[in-house]
Amino acid sequence: MLATAVVTAVTTPAVLLTVTPAFADARPTAGQSAAAQAAEDKPTIEELEAAAAEAQKAYDAAVAAEKAAKEAFDFACSDEAPHAVAAKAAADEAAAAKTAKEAADQALADAETELAELPETATEEERAAAEKKVADAKAAADAAEATKAAADEKAKKAATDADNARVAAGQALTKAEKATAEALKAKEAADKALADAKAEEDEDEDEDDDNDGDDGGACVPENGLTTVAQGLPSKIVAGSTVDFSVRVTNGTDKTLDEVLPFVYFHATDKSGYNVIDEYFGLQWSTKNSPEWNDVADGEYAGSISPLKAGAHADVKLRLKVDAKAPAGEGMAFVAGDYVNDDGTCGGNFFTEYEFDLLAAGSKPGKVDDAKPGKTSKTRPAVVPQGGTTGTLANTGADSALPQLAAAAGAAIALGAGAVFVVRRRKASSGS
């Protein structure tokens, strides 16, 4: 069930900034964390360079094949192609046969006229000669008819063969063009993967350099910062819009220059295996920014700047659920981070709010608010992993949500370095 927060928290050091509906398909071995498994499975720069080189070769080969197919197509459409030459010769032969038949028909007509116009005084020998002439002309006309029919059939077949040859060449060209397009996509994907990996490597090196000998910007756990959902119903009907809020309270003894609440909705259908996050849309609004703003996956739900010691502030939230969403179970993850102008940063742990997702048109009746679950700070001995869907396995309990809560707590308890996501480069950029 609902493994997004778990997978992201385990496999990246920036969990709250990068929670997305992406699921791990690998199964960690016994005694091995998902983070270690992900590190082992991650391709090296050298492997990505080799993959990019192979993709370039495949693309070059596809380009060459497309060029050859284009040349073959152009030749197939020319008058010099064998099928075109054969078709023209057959057409010329058919035309000659037609002319010959017309001449034979005219000769027969002339012979028949001559026979009909013989005078009564014609001798038997003259009449016999005229009748023979008609018979010979008739035989010649019949032969010409047969020759013309054969020539026409030959010309028709040759024309069909020529058309088929051109179509085949066109199909081969289309196939080659598609292959080139696919090879280009693969090449671009391989190049991007390599570029991203190099950029990540450079960023990690820069971060290491920035952090050497300077602990002033380290992110730390901050239990004094609390984020509580208010007015979030425990039952939500597909096709409805739910307005609620998150109250952020600074229980520390210092002003926090910028506080960033984080809210993420995750759900599955009743099977417990099919993730249906795409049906949720979340927006935020604050006193200083009253317009509604979309919350993209992995992004913060607004910003509060500053939040004085002992003060609190509310962020209005609006959840829209698509009417096509199937019934199921869901959970809202609520947390908060802060960034100070001096580069210090931190945040609190996830709090989970369970809710039932009802099918469109349902009448839930009186609905209580969703209750906050416990925030885990220690890792359970076993975190069950799912199958090819990447979701947590259903262990037979009445609901998979308790397992989700435990696993999410386990993920965020891997250490403050894996939980708190506000990096010093974010603070220095002012974003």
Image (cartoon, helix red, strand yellow):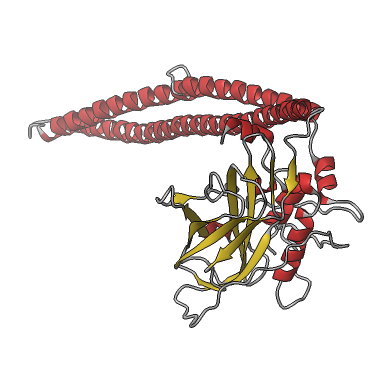
Q: Residue at x 59, y 34 (%)?
A: 182
Residue 382 is situated, as x and y percent measured from the top left of the image, at 86, 62
Q: Which quadrant holds the N terminus?
A: bottom right
Q: Residue at x 67, y 52 (%)?
A: 252
Horizontal arrangement in the rendering, residue 314 relative to residue 269 (left or right): left
Residue 275 is situated, as x and y percent measured from the top left of the image, at 62, 61
In the orientation shown, which residue stands out farthest toward the bottom? 365
Q: Nearer the viewer, residue 203 or 237?
A: 203
Residue 66 is situated, as x and y percent measured from the top left of the image, at 56, 24
Horizontal arrangement in the rendering, residue 362 relative to residue 199 (left or right): left
In the orientation shown, which residue stands out farthest toward the right? 31
* Count of marks overlaid on the render: 0
Horizontal arrangement in the rendering, residue 74 relative to residue 198 (left or right): left
Residue 58 is situated, as x and y percent measured from the top left of the image, at 68, 27
Q: Is residue 175 above or below residue 296?
A: above
Horizontal arrangement in the rendering, residue 332 relative to residue 319 (left or right): right
Q: Residue at x 51, y 73 (%)?
A: 359
Q: Is residue 301 above or below residue 89?
A: below
Q: Nearer the viewer, residue 220 or 135?
A: 220
Q: Residue at x 63, y 50 (%)?
A: 20
Q: Nearer the viewer, residue 326 or 411?
A: 411
Quadrant in the rendering for residue 13:
top right
Quadrant in the rendering for residue 91:
top left
Q: Which quadrant holds the C terminus?
A: top right
